[in-house]
Amino acid sequence: MTIWKRHFGPRHSRLAAVAALLALGTGCATYHDARVQDLPPQQQVRMRLAPDELARNVAFVSGNEGLVNARFVDLAGDSATFLLTTPTSHRQVNLHLASILSVERKEASHGRSMLLSAGLVAAVATLAYLGFEGDTNTGPNPDEDLTDQFTPMMRFSIPFKW
């Protein structure tokens, strides 16, 4: 019997699954279609680029959809300057407006952030409560040593012969 089943049971497993789905199903930002001409400076965006421009900036493609994450810098005539970003690198590039197939602006979703925070706090509080509740069906045996009353989280055994 696993430690989880011994202390929490199937009812609590469902509660943990709901908390995990809540955490995975919500995000703190949303993307909305936009035009390059309407972007304010420093706006975070993700773009779909024409194939030739995408090939030049393939190092900045994120995911299987071929989207590029960037920060808008400036608009000058028929080209726009963007700071392309990945978690490990960045590069400032000038892109012709015709090579930008679509732009989505990133906006903070305060409602989703609050929902995510509330869900995580509720999940932690529930797990803490259930963890401190303990097993009420069995009490300590006064004849046993005190160290035998604690259940170890992990046990290692090394087999050897004498």
Image (spheres, rainbow, N blue to C red):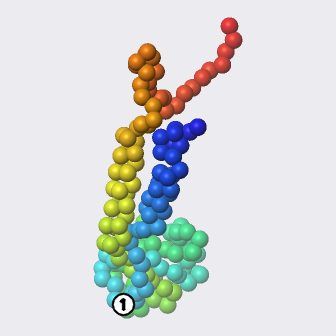
Residue 138: x, y in percent? 45, 31
Binning the other alpha carbons within 10 Å of mark 1 as few (below 14), some (14 to 19) or many (20 upward) gives few
Viewer-nearest residue: 27 or 35 = 27
Q: Is residue 89 visible?
A: no
Q: Is residue 155 shown left or right of residue 73?
A: right
Q: Which of the 4 image quadrants contains residue 133?
A: top left
Viewer-nearest residue: 98 or 124 = 124
- Label count reads 1
Q: Which of the 4 image quadrants contains residue 155?
A: top right
Q: Quadrant of the N terminus?
A: top right
SS class, disc 1: helix
Residue placed furthest toward the right: 161
| Residue at screen point 49% across, 52% down | 11
Q: Is residue 127 visible?
A: yes
Viewer-nearest residue: 142 or 46 = 142
Determine whether 2 is above or below 159 in the image.
below
Residue 107: x, y in percent? 35, 76
| Residue at screen point 45% across, 89% down | 97
Q: Is residue 90 shown left or right of residue 65?
A: left
Amino acid bearing label 1: Gln
Viewer-nearest residue: 107 or 118 = 118
Residue 128: x, y in percent? 36, 45
Residue 99: x, y in percent? 51, 86
| Residue at screen point 41% across, 25% down | 140
| Residue at screen point 40% across, 48% down | 127
Per the image, the residue denoted by label 1 is 37
Residue placed furthest toward the front: 137
Determine whether 87 is above or below 48 in the image.
above
Q: Quadrant of the C terminus?
A: top right
